[in-house]
Amino acid sequence: MFGAVLLVLFLSSLDQTIVGTALPRIVSDLRGDNLYTWVVTSYLLTSTVTVPIYGKLSDVYGRRPMLLIGVVIFLVGSALSGLSQSMGQLIAFRGVQGLGAGALFPISLAIIGDLFSPQERGRYQGFFGAVFGVSFIIGPFLGGFLTDHASWRWVFYVNIPVGIAALAVIAAVLPNMGRRPGSVRDFDFLGVALLSIGLVSLLIGLTEKGQTAPDGQLYGWLTWQVGGLILVAGVLLVAFILVERVAKEPVIPLDLFTTRTTAGTNAAVFCLGFGLFTAVIYLPRFFQVVRGISATQSGYEIWPLLVGLIGGSILGGQLISRTGRYKALMLISIGLLIVGAWLMTHLQADTNGVVLWSWMLILGAGVGPGLAAYTVVIQAAVPLRRLGVATSTLTLLRQLGGSVSLAIAGTLFNSTFVHQLPASFAAHGVPAAVAGPLSAAASSGNLSSLGAGAQLAQSPQLQALVPRILAAIHEAEALAIAQLFWLTIGAAVAAFLFTLLIKELPLRGGPALRQEQLDELAAAGVPEPVSPAAAAVTPAP
Protein backbone atom coordinates (compact mmCIF):
# COMPACT_ATOMS: atom_id res chain seq x y z
CA MET A 1 0.00 0.00 0.00
CA PHE A 2 2.74 2.45 0.98
CA GLY A 3 4.64 1.49 -2.17
CA ALA A 4 1.65 2.48 -4.32
CA VAL A 5 1.53 5.88 -2.63
CA LEU A 6 5.25 6.31 -3.30
CA LEU A 7 4.63 5.43 -6.97
CA VAL A 8 1.99 8.16 -7.16
CA LEU A 9 4.37 10.68 -5.63
CA PHE A 10 7.11 9.55 -8.01
CA LEU A 11 4.78 10.16 -10.97
CA SER A 12 4.19 13.72 -9.84
CA SER A 13 7.80 14.65 -9.09
CA LEU A 14 9.27 12.82 -12.12
CA ASP A 15 7.07 14.74 -14.53
CA GLN A 16 8.60 18.00 -13.30
CA THR A 17 12.12 16.88 -14.30
CA ILE A 18 11.74 14.53 -17.25
CA VAL A 19 9.99 16.97 -19.60
CA GLY A 20 12.63 19.71 -19.40
CA THR A 21 15.27 17.60 -21.16
CA ALA A 22 12.93 16.85 -24.06
CA LEU A 23 11.58 20.39 -24.54
CA PRO A 24 14.14 21.54 -27.16
CA ARG A 25 13.29 18.53 -29.37
CA ILE A 26 9.56 19.02 -28.77
CA VAL A 27 9.49 22.66 -29.85
CA SER A 28 11.65 21.79 -32.86
CA ASP A 29 9.28 19.03 -34.02
CA LEU A 30 6.09 20.98 -33.31
CA ARG A 31 7.53 24.33 -34.48
CA GLY A 32 6.56 26.38 -31.47
CA ASP A 33 9.60 28.29 -30.21
CA ASN A 34 7.43 31.26 -29.24
CA LEU A 35 5.28 29.01 -27.00
CA TYR A 36 8.21 27.25 -25.31
CA THR A 37 7.52 28.40 -21.75
CA TRP A 38 3.80 27.66 -21.92
CA VAL A 39 4.43 23.91 -22.06
CA VAL A 40 5.61 24.25 -18.45
CA THR A 41 3.36 27.14 -17.45
CA SER A 42 0.07 25.43 -18.39
CA TYR A 43 0.98 22.43 -16.22
CA LEU A 44 2.10 24.67 -13.36
CA LEU A 45 -1.10 26.71 -13.46
CA THR A 46 -3.57 23.84 -13.33
CA SER A 47 -1.58 21.72 -10.87
CA THR A 48 -1.17 24.63 -8.44
CA VAL A 49 -4.75 25.88 -8.59
CA THR A 50 -6.25 22.42 -7.98
CA VAL A 51 -4.10 21.54 -4.95
CA PRO A 52 -6.36 23.08 -2.26
CA ILE A 53 -9.51 21.94 -4.09
CA TYR A 54 -8.43 18.30 -4.03
CA GLY A 55 -7.39 18.67 -0.42
CA LYS A 56 -10.81 19.92 0.60
CA LEU A 57 -12.67 17.31 -1.46
CA SER A 58 -10.55 14.54 0.05
CA ASP A 59 -11.65 15.67 3.52
CA VAL A 60 -15.29 15.29 2.44
CA TYR A 61 -15.27 12.22 0.19
CA GLY A 62 -12.11 10.46 1.37
CA ARG A 63 -8.59 10.11 0.00
CA ARG A 64 -9.01 7.02 -2.19
CA PRO A 65 -11.62 8.32 -4.70
CA MET A 66 -9.88 11.70 -5.04
CA LEU A 67 -6.49 10.06 -5.55
CA LEU A 68 -7.90 7.63 -8.11
CA ILE A 69 -9.56 10.51 -9.99
CA GLY A 70 -6.33 12.49 -9.92
CA VAL A 71 -4.22 9.61 -11.24
CA VAL A 72 -6.72 8.83 -14.03
CA ILE A 73 -6.83 12.47 -15.18
CA PHE A 74 -3.03 12.65 -15.02
CA LEU A 75 -2.67 9.52 -17.17
CA VAL A 76 -5.23 10.75 -19.70
CA GLY A 77 -3.32 14.02 -19.94
CA SER A 78 -0.05 12.11 -20.35
CA ALA A 79 -1.43 10.00 -23.19
CA LEU A 80 -2.92 13.01 -24.96
CA SER A 81 0.32 14.98 -24.53
CA GLY A 82 2.23 12.16 -26.22
CA LEU A 83 -0.25 12.21 -29.12
CA SER A 84 -0.04 15.99 -29.63
CA GLN A 85 0.39 17.19 -33.21
CA SER A 86 0.84 20.90 -32.47
CA MET A 87 2.11 23.15 -29.69
CA GLY A 88 -1.42 24.32 -29.01
CA GLN A 89 -2.56 20.76 -28.42
CA LEU A 90 0.44 20.00 -26.21
CA ILE A 91 -0.14 23.09 -24.06
CA ALA A 92 -3.83 22.20 -23.65
CA PHE A 93 -3.10 18.55 -22.81
CA ARG A 94 -0.35 19.54 -20.37
CA GLY A 95 -3.04 21.58 -18.65
CA VAL A 96 -5.18 18.43 -18.42
CA GLN A 97 -2.20 16.59 -16.99
CA GLY A 98 -1.82 19.30 -14.36
CA LEU A 99 -5.49 18.99 -13.40
CA GLY A 100 -4.72 15.46 -12.25
CA ALA A 101 -1.26 16.23 -10.83
CA GLY A 102 -2.80 18.65 -8.32
CA ALA A 103 -4.15 15.64 -6.42
CA LEU A 104 -1.05 13.48 -6.35
CA PHE A 105 1.35 15.20 -3.97
CA PRO A 106 -0.96 16.62 -1.26
CA ILE A 107 -3.26 13.59 -1.05
CA SER A 108 -0.26 11.25 -0.88
CA LEU A 109 1.05 13.25 2.09
CA ALA A 110 -2.40 13.26 3.71
CA ILE A 111 -2.66 9.47 3.34
CA ILE A 112 0.47 9.12 5.47
CA GLY A 113 -1.30 11.21 8.09
CA ASP A 114 -4.28 8.85 7.93
CA LEU A 115 -2.39 5.57 7.94
CA PHE A 116 0.23 6.34 10.59
CA SER A 117 0.33 8.04 13.96
CA PRO A 118 2.19 11.36 14.31
CA GLN A 119 4.96 9.48 16.06
CA GLU A 120 5.46 7.30 12.97
CA ARG A 121 4.84 9.89 10.25
CA GLY A 122 8.33 11.40 10.23
CA ARG A 123 9.86 8.14 9.04
CA TYR A 124 7.48 7.85 6.11
CA GLN A 125 7.45 11.55 5.20
CA GLY A 126 11.24 11.27 4.99
CA PHE A 127 10.88 8.66 2.25
CA PHE A 128 8.69 11.10 0.36
CA GLY A 129 11.54 13.60 0.38
CA ALA A 130 13.86 10.88 -0.88
CA VAL A 131 11.50 10.08 -3.77
CA PHE A 132 11.49 13.77 -4.67
CA GLY A 133 15.30 13.75 -4.80
CA VAL A 134 15.51 10.50 -6.77
CA SER A 135 13.20 11.95 -9.42
CA PHE A 136 15.68 14.79 -9.93
CA ILE A 137 18.40 12.23 -10.60
CA ILE A 138 16.42 9.89 -12.85
CA GLY A 139 14.34 12.51 -14.68
CA PRO A 140 17.04 14.21 -16.81
CA PHE A 141 18.66 10.89 -17.74
CA LEU A 142 15.38 9.17 -18.62
CA GLY A 143 14.11 12.19 -20.56
CA GLY A 144 17.35 12.43 -22.57
CA PHE A 145 17.53 8.67 -23.20
CA LEU A 146 13.92 8.38 -24.40
CA THR A 147 14.24 11.47 -26.58
CA ASP A 148 17.49 10.29 -28.19
CA HIS A 149 16.67 6.59 -28.61
CA ALA A 150 12.88 6.47 -29.04
CA SER A 151 10.84 9.65 -29.29
CA TRP A 152 10.03 12.63 -27.09
CA ARG A 153 6.48 11.26 -26.99
CA TRP A 154 7.68 8.47 -24.70
CA VAL A 155 8.52 11.10 -22.08
CA PHE A 156 4.74 11.22 -21.55
CA TYR A 157 3.89 7.59 -22.36
CA VAL A 158 6.30 6.31 -19.69
CA ASN A 159 3.85 7.56 -17.03
CA ILE A 160 1.13 5.18 -18.15
CA PRO A 161 2.41 1.75 -16.98
CA VAL A 162 3.59 3.19 -13.66
CA GLY A 163 0.27 4.94 -13.14
CA ILE A 164 -1.78 1.85 -14.01
CA ALA A 165 0.19 -0.22 -11.49
CA ALA A 166 -0.42 2.40 -8.80
CA LEU A 167 -4.12 2.55 -9.67
CA ALA A 168 -4.50 -1.21 -9.32
CA VAL A 169 -2.89 -1.32 -5.87
CA ILE A 170 -4.74 1.76 -4.58
CA ALA A 171 -8.11 0.44 -5.74
CA ALA A 172 -7.42 -2.98 -4.23
CA VAL A 173 -5.94 -2.27 -0.80
CA LEU A 174 -6.17 1.41 0.18
CA PRO A 175 -9.01 2.10 2.66
CA ASN A 176 -11.04 5.24 2.07
CA MET A 177 -9.49 7.16 4.95
CA GLY A 178 -10.15 10.81 5.67
CA ARG A 179 -13.86 10.83 4.79
CA ARG A 180 -15.68 13.33 7.00
CA PRO A 181 -19.24 14.67 6.98
CA GLY A 182 -19.93 17.25 4.30
CA SER A 183 -22.32 18.20 1.56
CA VAL A 184 -21.89 19.31 -2.04
CA ARG A 185 -24.39 22.09 -1.28
CA ASP A 186 -22.06 23.46 1.40
CA PHE A 187 -18.99 23.32 -0.85
CA ASP A 188 -17.28 26.68 -1.24
CA PHE A 189 -17.80 27.20 -4.98
CA LEU A 190 -17.36 31.00 -4.81
CA GLY A 191 -14.15 30.59 -2.85
CA VAL A 192 -12.85 28.06 -5.38
CA ALA A 193 -13.62 30.45 -8.26
CA LEU A 194 -11.93 33.44 -6.61
CA LEU A 195 -8.90 31.39 -5.57
CA SER A 196 -8.51 29.79 -9.00
CA ILE A 197 -8.77 33.03 -10.99
CA GLY A 198 -6.57 34.85 -8.48
CA LEU A 199 -3.82 32.22 -8.58
CA VAL A 200 -3.97 31.97 -12.38
CA SER A 201 -3.57 35.75 -12.65
CA LEU A 202 -0.69 35.73 -10.18
CA LEU A 203 1.18 32.86 -11.85
CA ILE A 204 0.74 34.22 -15.38
CA GLY A 205 1.93 37.65 -14.22
CA LEU A 206 5.01 36.14 -12.57
CA THR A 207 5.68 33.93 -15.62
CA GLU A 208 5.49 36.87 -18.06
CA LYS A 209 8.05 38.88 -16.06
CA GLY A 210 11.15 39.17 -18.22
CA GLN A 211 9.53 37.65 -21.31
CA THR A 212 9.99 39.42 -24.65
CA ALA A 213 7.05 41.45 -26.01
CA PRO A 214 6.21 41.53 -29.76
CA ASP A 215 8.00 44.90 -30.04
CA GLY A 216 11.21 43.38 -28.70
CA GLN A 217 10.99 44.99 -25.25
CA LEU A 218 10.85 43.00 -22.03
CA TYR A 219 7.71 42.84 -19.91
CA GLY A 220 8.49 44.73 -16.69
CA TRP A 221 6.77 44.96 -13.33
CA LEU A 222 4.74 48.02 -14.44
CA THR A 223 3.29 46.46 -17.62
CA TRP A 224 -0.29 45.18 -17.56
CA GLN A 225 0.95 41.69 -18.51
CA VAL A 226 2.90 41.56 -15.22
CA GLY A 227 1.95 44.27 -12.72
CA GLY A 228 -1.64 44.48 -13.96
CA LEU A 229 -2.27 40.78 -13.55
CA ILE A 230 -0.58 40.73 -10.14
CA LEU A 231 -2.81 43.63 -9.05
CA VAL A 232 -5.90 41.74 -10.24
CA ALA A 233 -4.66 38.69 -8.34
CA GLY A 234 -4.25 40.75 -5.18
CA VAL A 235 -7.82 42.08 -5.38
CA LEU A 236 -9.27 38.63 -6.03
CA LEU A 237 -7.29 36.99 -3.22
CA VAL A 238 -8.45 39.66 -0.76
CA ALA A 239 -12.02 38.94 -1.87
CA PHE A 240 -11.27 35.22 -1.40
CA ILE A 241 -10.22 35.82 2.22
CA LEU A 242 -13.44 37.74 2.91
CA VAL A 243 -15.50 34.91 1.43
CA GLU A 244 -13.62 32.28 3.45
CA ARG A 245 -14.52 34.09 6.67
CA VAL A 246 -18.22 33.34 6.18
CA ALA A 247 -18.15 30.12 4.10
CA LYS A 248 -19.69 27.08 5.79
CA GLU A 249 -17.10 24.71 4.27
CA PRO A 250 -14.15 26.96 3.27
CA VAL A 251 -11.71 25.53 0.74
CA ILE A 252 -8.86 26.95 2.86
CA PRO A 253 -10.02 27.40 6.48
CA LEU A 254 -8.56 30.63 7.85
CA ASP A 255 -8.00 29.05 11.24
CA LEU A 256 -4.99 27.33 9.65
CA PHE A 257 -3.29 30.72 10.08
CA THR A 258 -4.58 31.76 13.49
CA THR A 259 -2.33 29.80 15.88
CA ARG A 260 1.41 30.26 16.34
CA THR A 261 2.20 26.74 15.20
CA THR A 262 0.07 26.55 12.07
CA ALA A 263 0.82 30.12 10.96
CA GLY A 264 4.54 29.69 11.61
CA THR A 265 4.63 26.38 9.75
CA ASN A 266 2.82 27.71 6.68
CA ALA A 267 4.96 30.85 6.54
CA ALA A 268 8.19 28.88 6.98
CA VAL A 269 7.29 26.48 4.17
CA PHE A 270 6.52 29.39 1.83
CA CYS A 271 9.97 30.85 2.62
CA LEU A 272 11.76 27.53 2.14
CA GLY A 273 10.00 26.99 -1.20
CA PHE A 274 11.16 30.49 -2.13
CA GLY A 275 14.76 29.64 -1.25
CA LEU A 276 14.93 26.12 -2.72
CA PHE A 277 13.75 26.80 -6.27
CA THR A 278 16.58 29.25 -6.97
CA ALA A 279 19.20 26.55 -6.44
CA VAL A 280 17.32 23.87 -8.36
CA ILE A 281 16.73 26.07 -11.43
CA TYR A 282 19.91 28.15 -11.67
CA LEU A 283 22.61 25.64 -10.72
CA PRO A 284 21.98 23.54 -13.88
CA ARG A 285 22.15 26.80 -15.85
CA PHE A 286 25.58 27.48 -14.33
CA PHE A 287 26.86 24.12 -15.52
CA GLN A 288 25.30 24.44 -18.99
CA VAL A 289 26.30 28.03 -19.79
CA VAL A 290 29.45 28.61 -17.75
CA ARG A 291 30.91 25.10 -17.80
CA GLY A 292 29.54 24.33 -21.29
CA ILE A 293 28.08 20.88 -20.64
CA SER A 294 24.83 19.36 -21.96
CA ALA A 295 21.45 19.78 -20.31
CA THR A 296 21.31 16.09 -19.40
CA GLN A 297 24.80 16.09 -17.89
CA SER A 298 24.09 19.26 -15.92
CA GLY A 299 21.39 17.35 -14.05
CA TYR A 300 24.06 15.03 -12.71
CA GLU A 301 26.50 17.77 -11.77
CA ILE A 302 24.14 18.78 -8.95
CA TRP A 303 24.23 15.25 -7.47
CA PRO A 304 25.73 16.44 -4.14
CA LEU A 305 22.74 18.75 -3.66
CA LEU A 306 20.41 15.80 -4.21
CA VAL A 307 22.45 13.46 -2.00
CA GLY A 308 22.22 16.00 0.81
CA LEU A 309 18.51 16.48 0.18
CA ILE A 310 17.71 12.74 0.09
CA GLY A 311 19.94 11.89 3.04
CA GLY A 312 18.70 14.81 5.10
CA SER A 313 15.08 13.95 4.39
CA ILE A 314 15.42 10.28 5.38
CA LEU A 315 17.61 10.98 8.42
CA GLY A 316 15.36 13.80 9.60
CA GLY A 317 12.28 11.61 9.31
CA GLN A 318 13.94 8.80 11.26
CA LEU A 319 15.04 11.16 14.04
CA ILE A 320 11.54 12.61 14.37
CA SER A 321 10.02 9.12 14.63
CA ARG A 322 12.60 7.92 17.16
CA THR A 323 12.67 10.97 19.43
CA GLY A 324 9.28 12.58 18.88
CA ARG A 325 11.08 15.95 18.72
CA TYR A 326 11.39 18.12 15.67
CA LYS A 327 11.89 21.82 16.41
CA ALA A 328 15.62 21.64 17.13
CA LEU A 329 16.14 19.52 14.00
CA MET A 330 14.30 22.08 11.88
CA LEU A 331 16.34 24.99 13.25
CA ILE A 332 19.64 23.15 12.76
CA SER A 333 18.72 22.23 9.18
CA ILE A 334 17.83 25.84 8.36
CA GLY A 335 21.20 26.85 9.85
CA LEU A 336 22.89 24.45 7.42
CA LEU A 337 20.86 25.93 4.58
CA ILE A 338 22.04 29.43 5.48
CA VAL A 339 25.68 28.27 5.61
CA GLY A 340 25.39 26.43 2.29
CA ALA A 341 23.72 29.40 0.59
CA TRP A 342 26.39 31.77 1.96
CA LEU A 343 29.11 29.55 0.52
CA MET A 344 27.30 29.55 -2.83
CA THR A 345 27.44 33.37 -2.92
CA HIS A 346 31.19 32.91 -3.52
CA LEU A 347 30.56 30.98 -6.74
CA GLN A 348 32.85 31.91 -9.66
CA ALA A 349 33.35 30.55 -13.16
CA ASP A 350 36.55 28.75 -12.09
CA THR A 351 35.39 27.47 -8.69
CA ASN A 352 37.00 24.10 -8.01
CA GLY A 353 34.60 21.22 -8.69
CA VAL A 354 35.23 19.40 -5.41
CA VAL A 355 34.75 22.62 -3.43
CA LEU A 356 31.50 23.32 -5.27
CA TRP A 357 30.30 19.78 -4.56
CA SER A 358 30.89 20.29 -0.82
CA TRP A 359 28.90 23.54 -0.90
CA MET A 360 25.99 21.84 -2.65
CA LEU A 361 26.07 18.94 -0.19
CA ILE A 362 25.67 21.35 2.75
CA LEU A 363 22.91 23.20 0.90
CA GLY A 364 20.98 19.97 0.24
CA ALA A 365 21.42 18.77 3.82
CA GLY A 366 19.82 22.01 4.95
CA VAL A 367 16.77 21.50 2.74
CA GLY A 368 16.12 17.77 3.23
CA PRO A 369 14.85 17.59 6.85
CA GLY A 370 12.28 20.30 6.20
CA LEU A 371 10.59 18.21 3.50
CA ALA A 372 9.47 15.79 6.22
CA ALA A 373 9.36 17.90 9.37
CA TYR A 374 6.94 20.66 8.42
CA THR A 375 4.37 18.19 7.13
CA VAL A 376 4.60 16.28 10.40
CA VAL A 377 4.10 19.54 12.33
CA ILE A 378 1.02 20.70 10.42
CA GLN A 379 -0.58 17.25 10.60
CA ALA A 380 0.00 17.11 14.36
CA ALA A 381 -1.39 20.63 14.89
CA VAL A 382 -4.77 20.30 13.13
CA PRO A 383 -7.83 18.14 13.82
CA LEU A 384 -8.07 14.95 11.79
CA ARG A 385 -11.02 16.35 9.84
CA ARG A 386 -8.70 19.09 8.51
CA LEU A 387 -5.78 16.81 7.59
CA GLY A 388 -6.31 16.92 3.81
CA VAL A 389 -6.89 20.64 3.48
CA ALA A 390 -4.03 21.48 5.86
CA THR A 391 -1.58 19.30 3.91
CA SER A 392 -2.71 20.67 0.55
CA THR A 393 -2.42 24.25 1.81
CA LEU A 394 1.17 23.52 2.83
CA THR A 395 1.88 22.15 -0.66
CA LEU A 396 0.24 25.19 -2.28
CA LEU A 397 2.35 27.61 -0.26
CA ARG A 398 5.55 25.73 -1.11
CA GLN A 399 4.75 25.96 -4.84
CA LEU A 400 3.75 29.62 -4.60
CA GLY A 401 6.99 30.41 -2.78
CA GLY A 402 8.92 28.83 -5.63
CA SER A 403 6.94 30.69 -8.30
CA VAL A 404 7.42 34.07 -6.62
CA SER A 405 11.13 33.43 -6.11
CA LEU A 406 11.71 32.55 -9.76
CA ALA A 407 10.17 35.85 -10.88
CA ILE A 408 12.29 37.87 -8.45
CA ALA A 409 15.38 35.77 -9.18
CA GLY A 410 14.98 36.38 -12.91
CA THR A 411 14.92 40.15 -12.39
CA LEU A 412 17.89 40.06 -9.99
CA PHE A 413 19.88 37.79 -12.29
CA ASN A 414 19.42 40.04 -15.33
CA SER A 415 20.26 43.24 -13.47
CA THR A 416 23.35 41.71 -11.82
CA PHE A 417 24.56 40.25 -15.11
CA VAL A 418 24.22 43.62 -16.87
CA HIS A 419 25.99 45.39 -13.99
CA GLN A 420 28.89 42.90 -13.83
CA LEU A 421 29.51 42.60 -17.56
CA PRO A 422 31.49 45.84 -18.25
CA ALA A 423 33.90 45.20 -15.36
CA SER A 424 34.27 41.58 -16.45
CA PHE A 425 35.10 42.65 -20.03
CA ALA A 426 37.72 45.04 -18.71
CA ALA A 427 39.23 42.41 -16.41
CA HIS A 428 39.64 40.02 -19.34
CA GLY A 429 41.22 42.61 -21.63
CA VAL A 430 38.34 43.07 -24.08
CA PRO A 431 38.74 46.41 -25.91
CA ALA A 432 36.16 49.07 -25.08
CA ALA A 433 35.14 49.32 -28.74
CA VAL A 434 33.96 45.69 -28.59
CA ALA A 435 32.82 45.60 -24.98
CA GLY A 436 30.58 48.67 -25.33
CA PRO A 437 28.16 47.29 -27.96
CA LEU A 438 28.00 43.93 -26.18
CA SER A 439 27.21 45.58 -22.84
CA ALA A 440 24.54 47.68 -24.54
CA ALA A 441 23.03 44.55 -26.08
CA ALA A 442 22.95 42.94 -22.63
CA SER A 443 21.20 46.01 -21.18
CA SER A 444 18.47 45.75 -23.80
CA GLY A 445 17.97 42.06 -23.09
CA ASN A 446 19.30 40.91 -26.47
CA LEU A 447 22.50 39.20 -25.36
CA SER A 448 22.69 35.48 -24.70
CA SER A 449 26.17 34.35 -23.69
CA LEU A 450 26.16 31.41 -26.03
CA GLY A 451 24.42 33.26 -28.84
CA ALA A 452 26.84 36.17 -28.67
CA GLY A 453 29.79 33.80 -28.78
CA ALA A 454 28.43 32.08 -31.89
CA GLN A 455 27.96 35.41 -33.70
CA LEU A 456 31.43 36.62 -32.82
CA ALA A 457 33.00 33.39 -33.99
CA GLN A 458 31.66 34.14 -37.48
CA SER A 459 33.54 37.45 -37.60
CA PRO A 460 37.17 36.89 -38.73
CA GLN A 461 38.27 40.24 -37.32
CA LEU A 462 37.13 39.34 -33.83
CA GLN A 463 37.94 35.64 -33.68
CA ALA A 464 41.07 36.31 -31.63
CA LEU A 465 38.94 38.01 -28.98
CA VAL A 466 36.31 35.28 -28.76
CA PRO A 467 37.96 33.34 -25.88
CA ARG A 468 38.29 36.54 -23.81
CA ILE A 469 34.74 37.65 -24.56
CA LEU A 470 33.27 34.27 -23.65
CA ALA A 471 35.38 34.11 -20.47
CA ALA A 472 34.12 37.55 -19.45
CA ILE A 473 30.49 36.65 -20.18
CA HIS A 474 30.79 33.36 -18.28
CA GLU A 475 32.34 35.12 -15.29
CA ALA A 476 29.53 37.69 -15.23
CA GLU A 477 27.00 34.88 -15.51
CA ALA A 478 28.57 33.01 -12.60
CA LEU A 479 28.63 36.13 -10.42
CA ALA A 480 24.99 36.83 -11.26
CA ILE A 481 23.99 33.30 -10.24
CA ALA A 482 26.04 33.61 -7.05
CA GLN A 483 24.12 36.75 -6.04
CA LEU A 484 20.84 34.85 -6.27
CA PHE A 485 21.79 32.87 -3.19
CA TRP A 486 21.38 36.01 -1.11
CA LEU A 487 17.66 35.50 -1.81
CA THR A 488 18.01 31.99 -0.39
CA ILE A 489 19.76 33.38 2.70
CA GLY A 490 17.04 35.98 3.25
CA ALA A 491 14.28 33.41 2.81
CA ALA A 492 16.05 30.95 5.13
CA VAL A 493 16.50 33.58 7.86
CA ALA A 494 12.78 34.37 7.62
CA ALA A 495 11.98 30.63 7.80
CA PHE A 496 14.21 30.35 10.89
CA LEU A 497 12.29 33.15 12.63
CA PHE A 498 8.92 31.65 11.69
CA THR A 499 10.07 28.24 12.93
CA LEU A 500 10.86 29.79 16.32
CA LEU A 501 7.14 30.54 16.61
CA ILE A 502 6.24 26.85 16.29
CA LYS A 503 5.24 25.15 19.50
CA GLU A 504 6.63 21.64 19.77
CA LEU A 505 3.57 19.45 20.19
CA PRO A 506 3.73 15.91 21.59
CA LEU A 507 3.39 13.35 18.81
CA ARG A 508 0.61 10.94 19.70
CA GLY A 509 1.17 7.22 19.49
CA GLY A 510 -0.83 4.78 17.42
CA PRO A 511 -3.57 3.77 19.93
CA ALA A 512 -4.35 7.38 20.90
CA LEU A 513 -4.61 8.45 17.27
CA ARG A 514 -6.75 5.46 16.35
CA GLN A 515 -9.17 6.23 19.16
CA GLU A 516 -9.37 9.85 18.03
CA GLN A 517 -10.20 8.69 14.51
CA LEU A 518 -12.95 6.37 15.74
CA ASP A 519 -14.41 9.08 18.01
CA GLU A 520 -14.59 11.57 15.12
CA LEU A 521 -16.19 9.03 12.80
CA ALA A 522 -18.72 7.94 15.42
CA ALA A 523 -19.70 11.53 16.20
CA ALA A 524 -20.25 12.17 12.48
CA GLY A 525 -22.15 8.93 11.88
CA VAL A 526 -19.55 7.75 9.34
CA PRO A 527 -18.71 4.01 9.28
CA GLU A 528 -15.18 2.89 10.00
CA PRO A 529 -13.14 2.69 6.76
CA VAL A 530 -12.34 -0.77 5.45
CA SER A 531 -9.94 -1.50 2.61
CA PRO A 532 -11.42 -3.07 -0.55
CA ALA A 533 -9.28 -6.15 -0.05
CA ALA A 534 -10.51 -6.63 3.51
CA ALA A 535 -14.12 -6.02 2.49
CA ALA A 536 -13.86 -8.73 -0.16
CA VAL A 537 -12.98 -11.40 2.40
CA THR A 538 -15.29 -10.25 5.22
CA PRO A 539 -18.06 -12.84 5.65
CA ALA A 540 -21.60 -11.59 5.20
CA PRO A 541 -23.66 -11.46 8.40
Image: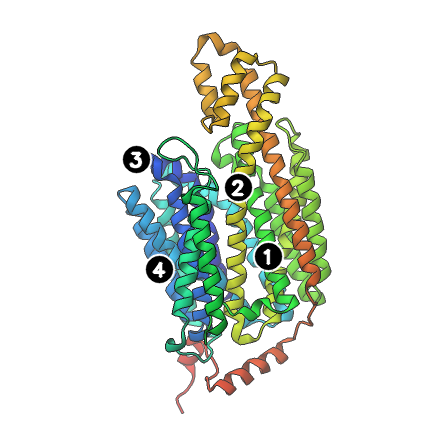
Q: Amino acid at mark 3?
A: Arg
**Residue 281 - label:** 2
Q: Which residue is mark 4?
A: 73
Identify the residue at image location x=59%, y=19%. 425
CB under 8 Å between discs 4 and 1: no
The amino acid type of the residue labelled 2 equals Ile
Q: Residue at x 64, y 26 (%)?
A: 350
- Vertically, is 231 above or below 143? below
**Mark 4 or 3, closer to the camera:** 3
Relative to 415, does residue 327 appear above or below in the rendering?
A: below
Give the mark nearest the N terminus, 4 or 1: 4
> What residue is shown with label 3?
31
- In the image, farthest residue toward the left: 85
Mark-to-mark CA distance, 1 and 3 = 39 Å
Mark 2 near mark 1, Cβ–Cβ under 8 Å?
A: no
Q: Is residue 318 left or right of residue 66?
A: right
Q: CA separation, marks 2 and 3? A: 25 Å
313 and 535: which is toward the camera: 313
Q: Label 4 vs label 1: CA separation?
A: 28 Å
The earlier-in-sequence mark between 2 and 4 is 4
Whether residue 525 appears in this view of the structure is yes
